[in-house]
Amino acid sequence: MRRLKVFKSLLIDSLDVITHGSRKYHLWMGFLTFVMLVGMYCYSIQLDQGLSVTGMTDRVSWGLYISNFTFLVGVAAAAVMLVMPTYVLKDIDFKQAVLIGEGLAVAALIMCLAFVVADMGGPSVLWHMIPGIGVFNFPNSMLTWDVIVLNGYLFLNISIPYYILFRHYQGKDANPKIYVPGALISVFWAVSIHLVTAFLYQGLQARPFWNNALLGPRFLASAFAAGPALIILVLAIIRNYTAFKVENKTIGKLAMIVTVAAQINLIMLVSELFKEFYAPTHHSESAYYLFFGLHGKNALLPWIWTSIPLNVLATVLLTFGKFRNNFKVLYFCCFILFVAIWIEKGFGLIVPGFIPGPYGKIAEYTPTGVEIGVTMGIWALGAFVFTILAKTAIKIETGKLRYKKKDSQ
Amino acid sequence: MNNNCYTYSIGCLIMALFLSFSCKHKESKYHSLTDKIEEESKDFIGTDISLETLLEEMKLLEIHEEGHAFLIPERKGQLKSYACSECHTKPLASMTSLEIGKKAHWNVKLAHADNLTMNCITCHSESNLDELTSLTGSEIDFDASYKLCSQCHTAQFKDWTGGAHGKKIAGWAPPRASMTCVNCHNPHSPSFDTRWPSRFNTQMEKERKEGLSH
Amino acid sequence: MSENNTKWFSLNLSNSKPKQQASTCGCGNTSGGCGGHQNEIRSSAIGDERHKDGFEQVFDVQMDRRTAFKKLTASLLIGAGAVTTSCSVVADEKSKEKAQIDWEEQFKGNYKLMSDEEKKATVDRLVRSYELRTNKTISMTSENAQENVLFGYAFNISKCQGYMDCVSACVEENNQDRNSEMQYIRIHEMKDGQGLKFDEADDNYYHEVPAEGHFYLGTQCFHCDNPPCVDVCPVQATWREEDGLVVIDYDWCVGCRYCMAACPYDGRRFNWSKPEVPEDEVNKNQHYLGNRMRKKGVMEKCTFCVQRSRKGQNPACVDACPTGARIFGNLLDPNSTIRWVLENKKVFRLKEDLGTEPKFWYFMD
């Protein structure tokens, strides 16, 4: 009963927190709301006319939505990079940042789910997927595995920070005996969400571009580069605009993680390129399409040749401690690395899987305005959710938001 | 203590899931599809599906060739002016000498092998135009015209009796009814003509050309 | 349609109404000819008319963007449409029946798991719904797979001349969307002497055929015995029937297109928009798993014309082929022609190394 009361007060307080802020904050939220509304409008067009308003065709049947989904699963998985040292290795450094990381994971997961729903041809019958009411083709379909791990991860990433914040809100300490096991599970879980998402593609013998054993590990490596890179950027912004203290040491450690992951990712990229181009078979055609174009079709060339140099540049810069420890360079590196991996893991992974088609036919894919609108709307949704979560969390963590604080005043 | 139990049970659950997944590829009884087909058809007792009602109204003849028994459409009733003897009262030789006006079969141009190999009387009996004739001069009934074709086209004939050449009438279910040679091939000009395809997919063309179809 | 053994949730909007009765509009005219309703009924495929009730109203109706946007929030509430209907004063008996059907259709179970009565019930509902919407009667069946039947197909590469009559027949038989020119069959025009070079083949030629120095090879769904598309479907909306046909429950499909990515043979098609077939071209001889009208956002594909093959007939493509390049039959019947082909001809299949075991063989004379 008391808990309910506290919960209610937390809700009211956080509502108060998120509706008040500086002008910049209001502008930011207003902007996000506007983008979301545009996205919803675009989605309503898609609902009305069908997926034909997107650039997808029978040839390239997954596009921007699934690309972003794949990438964001990686971002979500990266929260583990903060969770692990903090809870498991008892490294105090990250304690401040971990809530941010988990908030980011929640936002990323919500975006993932939104992208999947946006990609569905029949959102009105999505209940067919709910176990019990519908038919859940488990364990045969990797998609059902993905549904389980994503929702499970979402649950973990909501419940752990919620528990901690809920205790802190009441001015109590969180009991590690309760949240550490959860954190421990979420560590394994994070790896599994990304591996399972990789298996989604890896298990298709029809698509040689995806059907290779390196896909899963490469997913992990790129995720652990892009995710913490985003966290670094977010922490930088939070540090600048709020009272929340993030130590340099924390960011330094995160930068180390990004560096190692980016290096591993680059090694795997080289290995992949070697396999595709040293002894090319007709299974290498997708890679040819991606990197050099095929039969005069080369829509992806500008993208991938933006991504690769950015990726290499960022990795090289980060490798040298001198650059890495210069925060301006670090932020720049994180940004370009994030963009590079977004291209490589999104577009660069999904679209070539379909080109050329099973019988070597090529139809290129270019997203339409509606599709881009929905995508931006979902990104705005993610940013919106994250802003709300982060703002509340920061207020609680900095001690400005406490249960019954108002009464004592 | 409780927490340990919790993690342990979750771990077990994950293991169980993985195990159940690894069993996805159900060990099938057969090594390949062909083995399966062979094995399962060993004691084939037939199905409930039959084409008899569909074939009821057609005039069909049963033939036995190369160890296969099946139905083919009757031919004589389909010919426009059978019996030929209604006009051809005299043997062919005496009719060619008449030379009056337009010839009766002016539209028949023989495009079947070349002149060295075939002319009208390679197949049509000179003396009895109601019958066809084999290379050795035996008479062949119009309804059994395939026997004429099979004299040269032995490979096609074998495929036809087996079912690899030609079309079936109505469906796959027994009884088997196949079209005979002349149902698809004009005996005077048996090869198929070149022609334009019956469809062209403009949408697919757009999709391939532009990359954007909408 | 008994209430106790259904797999769908039933919303009884009008208790007194006998469900299968044809005359409900009160004017005594059984064929729906009482003026007032006729304006509402436009002749087009299922679910196109403006006045719709039930769940469809929220999700599937053709509306301008402004209204669509307004209704977007409402659409989150399941059953909002049904509420409007039940509260609506103007709703007559017919639209109530429509709403009832829509509701039951929306919440029915997976066809694969239905009992024979349930299958029949949904087929009856679909037929009735079509009748209510278009005033036309269709015949739809739900025949199950027969015992001792396993369908197989053989394609004679030396015979095919590339006329594409099979493609035409398939489109007409299976009520495929005319707007997007959906086709299940592809005929690949290949150069002689280069083997099977699919990437250099043209599957959308338009010139006199057969072209000099080319041969033709057709592909479609191969009805694999070990179909990868079936494994990946998250909701079991596609499965392999006992007679070897790989089929889709169009109403159960959620439209994730995972099966499409998993198919190595380009056998599957997606309805990116609402499929449309001119009313007079609709093939009214339908099967639930076959050529019945689809909706937007679901998968479809070749079913070896289940509506024909389960009656003993050949698929439309086989019947349409003027050269006899297509052979269809029962693989379990040792005396069938398809068996003779497999045993006496040098047959091969495409991408056999993938282990999908297609039931579609190619051979040459």
Image (spheres, coloured by chain):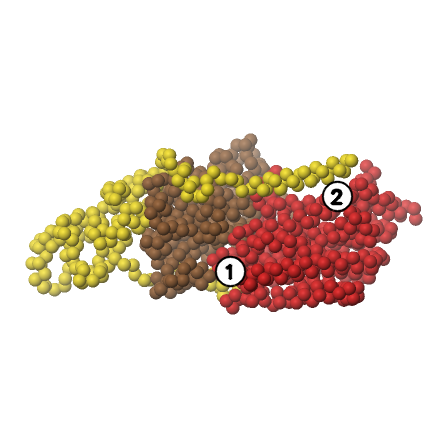
Q: Position of residue C246 (x, y in %)?
A: 47, 45
Q: Secondary structure at mark 1?
A: loop
Give how far apart the Cα atoms at labels 1 and 2 are: 46 Å
Q: Position of residue C361 (x, y in %)?
A: 40, 50
Identify the amino acid type marked 1: Thr
Q: Image quarter for residue A298?
A: bottom right
Q: Which chain is red?
A: A
Q: Chain of mark 2?
A: A
Say which residue appears at 43% left-offset and 47% top-offset: C359
| C101 with respect to A151 (left or right) | left
Say which residue appears at 40% left-offset and 56% top-offset: C217
Q: Which chain is brown?
A: C
Q: Image quarter for residue B171?
A: top left
Q: Where is mark 1, residue-wise?
A: A281
Disc 1 or disc 2, which is closer to the eye?
1
Say which of B168 and C350 sits in front: C350
Badges 1 and 2, same chain: yes
Identify the amino acid type marked 2: Gly
Q: Which mark is residue C189?
A: none
Q: Which chain is yellow?
A: B
Q: Position of residue A22 (x, y in %)?
A: 82, 60
Residue B191 visible in this rendered orientation of the protein: yes
Q: Secondary structure at mark 2?
A: helix
| A188 with respect to B193 (left or right) | right
Q: Where is mark 2, residue-wise?
A: A182
| B27 with respect to B53 (left or right) | right
Q: Classify C359 as above or below A356.
A: above
Q: Residue furthest right?
A: A409
Q: Residues within 10 Å of mark 2 (few under 14, many from 20)?
A: some
